[in-house]
Amino acid sequence: MRLVCELLLKLGPPVALTLKFAHRNELELPDMLILALDTSTQAGSLAVLRDTRVVGEVSTWVDETYSSRMFRHLEFLLHELHIELAQVDLYAVAAGPGSFTGLRVGLTAVKGWAEVYRKPIAAVSALEAVAAQVQAQEPLLVPVIDARRGQVYAGLYERREQGLARRGEEVVMTPAEFLERLGSQAGAAGLAFVSPTPEVLSTHLAASVFRGRPVEAVSTVLAPVIGRLGHARAQRGELLDALTLDANYVRRSDAELLWKGP
């Protein structure tokens, strides 16, 4: 009990906290060591993987952007696994869409580490990480994330032999607008909807051509999935460096929306 209390005090006051660690022997395997980050949403997470095996994970959900507590969680995770940032072979990070502040902090941190330690980066869409968790077998996947302000981030992904491939641009709009656009572009057949917060979409499906379709609920903890997708990108040679890494904000920032110009 004392150890649990000390960990909670060190990590901060989360509403929900998940800590997962693999058996210590797995850390001795000579595989690619991956640090994966998701700072795009309130449900932020960190994970360390050996290739596609998760050996450590920290995830929380509180009413603040995850970037505000990411560094103390990272310190704890690396300490528990007895590894250092210099040992990491690949940084896998959610590049958007998501919170502007969260994305900027996460991407800036990864840029700095990649520059200092001269290691590559795998940029992964948060929507792809949602789609990659689906159990449905339809050929087209529609991942949706709550963008707040009555809007959703959404995209369309297609199953291919090498993995998921995005069809068109990821968007931010109201659920009704997105469903109308999706129906006109992709039709109503062969689609599977998937979301970590299915309630943001399910009530709108009844008033669309997708009436009666379910929304598969998946985990809000994206870092382990981002790590596995990053590993796949590394195998295909689809990596970036600190200079080429960029965010996919989708929605303009509040500063841009409020700026009137001269």
Image: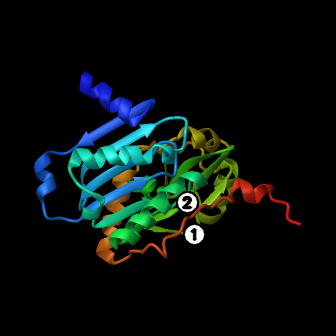
Rendered position, 222 above or below 187: above
Total residue callouts? 2
Rendered position, 26 above or below 234: above
Near-viewer residue (115 or 155) = 115
Q: Residue at x 22, y 65 (%)?
A: 32
Q: Residue at x 20, y 50 (%)?
A: 82
Q: Position of residue 170 (x, y in %)?
A: 58, 63
Residue 155: which disc? 2
Q: Position of residue 118 (x, y in %)?
A: 34, 73
Q: Residue at x 38, y 41 (%)?
A: 59
Label 1 vs label 2: CA separation?
8 Å
**Residue bearing mark 1:** 168
Mark 1 or mark 2: name the one nearer the start of the chain.
2
> In terms of secondary structure, where does tag 1 sit?
loop
Residue 37 is left or right of residue 145, and the answer is left
Residue 127: which disc? none
Rendered position, 170 above or below 221: below
Near-viewer residue (84 or 120) = 84
Near-viewer residue (92 or 225) = 92
Circle 2 Cα neighbour tier, 10 Å, few/some/many (<14 / 14–19 / ≥20): many
> In terms of secondary structure, where does tag 2 sit?
loop
Mark 1 and mark 2 residues within 8 Å of each other at the beta carbon: yes
Kindly tell me whether residue 54 is visible in this rendering.
yes
Near-viewer residue (104 or 138) = 104
The outermost residue toward the bottom is: 237
Quadrant of the frame with the C terminus? bottom right
Q: Amino acid at mark 2?
A: Gly
